[in-house]
Amino acid sequence: MDNDCLFCKIINGEIPGDKVYEDEFVYAFKDINPAAPIHILVVPKKHIDCLANISDEDEKYIWAIHKAINIIAENMGFKENGYRIIVNSGRDSGQEVMHLHYHLLAGAKFGDKIV
Ligand code: 5GP
Ligand code: ZN
């Protein structure tokens, strides 16, 4: 928990978030400014600032995020059609919220491939 962190506050209920999934390690909620018909942020319940700074002890959170993505995809009915994951890490990526988050985008065929 980081007292000044927006996503920590959403996880602990201090700030409302539109929750779509939660388990022991993961919290997932709708992005406030969606970039796709479905745009969910999947975050670890532990405050980790960015992907570049994960450590071995964070392994369970990273695995849980990936499992959660597929549970959400199954529950919301887009697992078969597919989805895109984006993780920004650090200054050059444009990361704005310094709490690790996986952008889960779905509900459209994405034409603008970067990679
Ligand atoms: P970043 O640019 O750090 O990878 O992504 C941050 C994301 O958080 C953005 O897509 C932005 O729309 C989202 N966001 C920022 N503030 C809030 C908020 O208060 N609630 C929710 N649900 N999403 C937020
Ligand atoms: Zn945080």
Image (tube, rainbow, N blue to C red):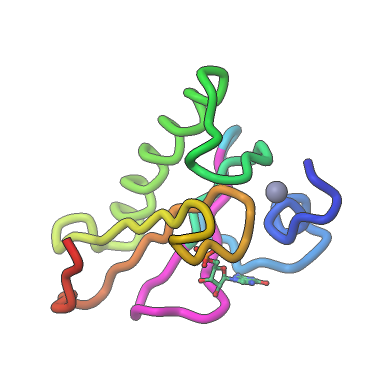
Quarter the N terminus occupies: top right
Quarter the C terminus occupies: bottom left
What is the span of residues highlighted in magenta in the rendered image? 26-40
Q: Which is nearer the eye, 94 or 75?
A: 94
Q: Residue furthest top?
A: 56
Ligand 1, image quadrant it occupies = bottom right
Q: Which is nearer the eye, 100 or 74?
A: 100
Q: Residue visible at 60% across and 68% down?
A: 18
Let me know if residue 32 is in the magenta part: yes
Q: Which is nearer the eye, 8 or 95?
A: 95
Q: Residue furthest front?
A: 92
Q: State the image coordinates of residue 17 (x, y, percent, origin top left).
A: 66, 66
Quarter assignment of residue 19: bottom right
Q: Would you say 43 lies left or right of 39 here?
A: right
Let me know if residue 3 is in the magenta part: no
Q: Residue visible at 62% across and 61% down?
A: 97
Q: Residue visible at 53% across and 31% down?
A: 54
On screen, residue 49 above or below 72 = above
Q: Would you say 2 lies left or right of 36 here?
A: right
Q: Would you say 11 lies left or right of 56 here?
A: right
Q: Which is nearer the eye, 92 or 21?
A: 92
Q: State the image coordinates of residue 113 (x, y, percent, origin top left).
A: 16, 70
On screen, residue 111 above or below 4 = below
Q: Residue visible at 26% across and 61% down?
A: 84
Quarter assignment of residue 34: bottom left
Q: State the image coordinates of residue 109 (x, y, percent, origin top left).
A: 15, 76
Count numbered badges in the picture. Answer: 0
Q: State the image coordinates of residue 51 (x, y, percent, origin top left).
A: 48, 42
